[in-house]
Amino acid sequence: MSDSLERRRILVVDDEERMVRFIRMNLEHDGFQVSEAFNGKQAIQKLRDVTPDLILLDVMMPDLDGFEVLETIREITTVPVIMLTAKGEEDDRVRGLEGGADDYVTKPFSPRELVSRVKAVLRRTEGATGSMHGLLEIDKRLKIDFDRREIWLEGKLVKLRPTEYRLLFHLVQNAGWVVSHDQLLQKVWGYEYRDEPHYVRLYINYLRQKLEKDPADPKYILTERGVGYRFVDYKRGKE
């Protein structure tokens, strides 16, 4: 495990104590610090107390279910969340991603798969890095400062979740060029996600909802049908 991910704090939320013990044992084996919560109310309290770097959140819980807890989490913080869903419950996975989850793992899962997903999500929240410095003025509406991790739209600061931010970085870094679905999956999500193309479509939609004046007729993030996406070549207009 890389030094940058060592000792990261993981909050595990599941009403099954056996499942929590299983997850805790495997995460601690890989050097993570683990906190536990056995229902939604405990989870929200632990979120405030321990400030986790990532949350593993079960969908099926009594009292508050995982979606209700996720909604509350997203009102407080952009901390990455991986949902734990039942096998075959595709609606739960889609609902979780649309509600602000960063990923999902389907039960039953192997320890290796779980740890791999946790590391992948943490890696992409490390922040985008590259050669783009200073304030980028895309046009009069949109300004981006990757050094400060700030996106300004019509003079107002726009909040992006870590994955949205990372996706935007790679699109802007290649402004004017088409970036394929596979390239975006590998750069933003990691090699483990090469068979998950729906992630790209979903998060492109999130970015358009937040940045475009008319998401149905985008001017910044353009679709190259069957190939990928292209961020508008904002530099050309200023030459």
Image (cartoon, rainbow, N blue to C red):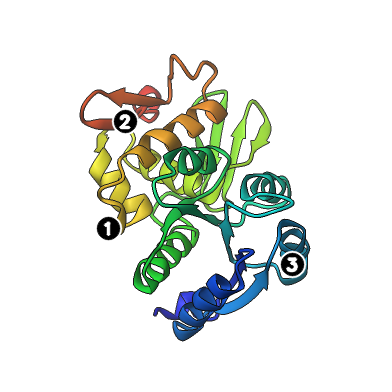
Would you place residue 228 above or below residue 132 in this image?
Answer: above
At label 1, the amino acid type is Tyr
Residue at image point 67% right, 44% down = 71
Indicate the amino acid at tag 3: Lys
* Residue identified by numbered label 1: 191
Give the residue displayed 25% in from the left and 48% down from the top. 195
Whether residue 141 is visible, yes or no, is yes
Across and down, in percent, residue 156 comes to: 68, 32
**Image location (x, y in percent) of residue 13:** 62, 64
Horizontal relation, residue 226 to residue 90: left or right: left
Residue extending furthest left? 226
Q: Which residue is mark 3?
A: 46
- For disc 3, the neighbor class at 10 Å (few under 14, some 14 to 19, many from 20) is some
Q: Which secondary structure lies at badge 1? A: helix
Which one is earlier in the sequence, the residue at label 1 or at label 2?
A: 1
Q: Secondary structure at mark 2?
A: strand
The tag earlier along the polypeptide, 2 or 3, is: 3
**Residue positioned 37% across, 51% down in the render:** 188
On the image, which quarter does residue 53 sit in? bottom right
Tell me the residue that label 2 is attached to.
230
| Quadrant of the rendering where the C terminus is positioned | top left
Instruction: Calculate the distance from the C-alpha at mark 1 to the C-alpha at mark 2.
Output: 21 Å
**On the rendered structure, is 230 left or right of 91?**
left
